[in-house]
Amino acid sequence: MIVVSGEALMDVFAGEPTATGVQLDARIGGSPFNVAMGLARLAQPVAFFGALSHGFLGDRLMQALQDEGIHTSCTARLDAPTTLSLVGLDARGVPSYDFYGEGAADRRLPLHALARVPAASAYHFGSYAMVVEPVAGTQRALVERESARAVISYDPNIRLNVEPDIQVWRQALAWMLPHTALLKVSDEDLGLLYPGRAPAELAREWLAAGVSLVVVTQGGEGATAWHAGGEVSRRKHDLPVQPFDRPAMLNEAPGEVIEQFWMRRSLAQISKLARRVHQAATKVMLPHAIHDHASRQRRGFLRQSLRQLEPAAARGEFPRRTAL
């Protein structure tokens, strides 16, 4: 079982103007919510630990979880509204977000809800639910409870229009480092957290702090991963991107990374994990419309480019932060 913790909300896209306003298209979303969906689609047992409203939008989010086979026994329902994220796309298809969620259900997850969280092999945390209270305190308590016996995954996914103080995000990351086995962060987030710092330098510091695997995604340019045995990069691919799909895909792909981290059973198999890490990291920009044959071609390229890691894995140079 993998438990994903954090926010579930509605992404609201602006459509065409009308005579009296503008059309809006509301879609289920939220970074952790999308990670849970991605894991379920990888046929992994997954539960969602977060709070949904009792309103019709909360009902829609709950229906989506249940339709995907995601366990909802630890999903709380509260008398509070659902967060709305208004998504605008610029000429390049890059999204911007305006959040309307003060006092919303996803931010009010209470501490007593921890009693409903099942024992699991892995727990994923991320996005603004780790920096707004009281949900952040509830999630930190879960990290403290489980980090000694389970894999902890973390993706900061910074949203300054929710919490504008970047120091709060830095403090959340610093607190998570000694508890985290798998850290995924985008180059955009790195630019906000530590402008001017080299990703490799930061990765070395985070590995020294206790992280086992650091993955930095670089949008259409690919991704880079660091671990005790070395560094591997996957550079720009030529597969097409549909901008409208980008918000969900950016959040859904970490599920594959978490799935593989959780499933591996020996040091010698970590090289296979590295392959899938980069497969997932490059996959984040791909729309659902990409055909399977393109995915197979990409996997073949990644297998070839990451084969260099196998000798290090065989020598046992990958740390095992927790018993898997």
Image: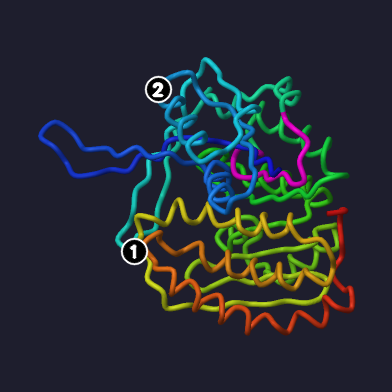
Residue 233 highlighted magenta (yes or no): no
When asked about the image quadrant of residue 231, the answer is bottom right
What span is colored magenta in the figure? 117-130
Q: Secondary structure at mark 2?
A: helix
Nearer to me, 293 or 122: 293
Nearer to me, 319 or 201: 319
Residue 238 rendering spot, x and y as whole percentages: 42, 78
Q: Residue at x 72, y 44 (%)?
A: 123
What residue would you read off at disc 2? 56
Looking at the rendered image, the quarter that the C terminus falls into is bottom right
When asked about the image quadrant of residue 191, the answer is bottom right
What residue would you read off at disc 1? 92
The tag earlier along the polypeptide, 1 or 2, is: 2
Q: Secondary structure at mark 1?
A: loop
Residue 142 rendering spot, x and y as whole percentages: 77, 34
Give the left or right position of residue 88, taking residue 181 as reference: left
Residue 295 rendering spot, x and y as whole percentages: 48, 71
Give the left or right position of residue 239, taking residue 313 as reference: left
Looking at the rendered image, the quarter that the N terminus falls into is top right
113 relative to 8, above or below: above
| Neighbourhood count class around disc 2 (C-alpha, 10 Å): few under 14, some 14–19, many 20 upward | few
Q: Residue furthest top?
A: 79
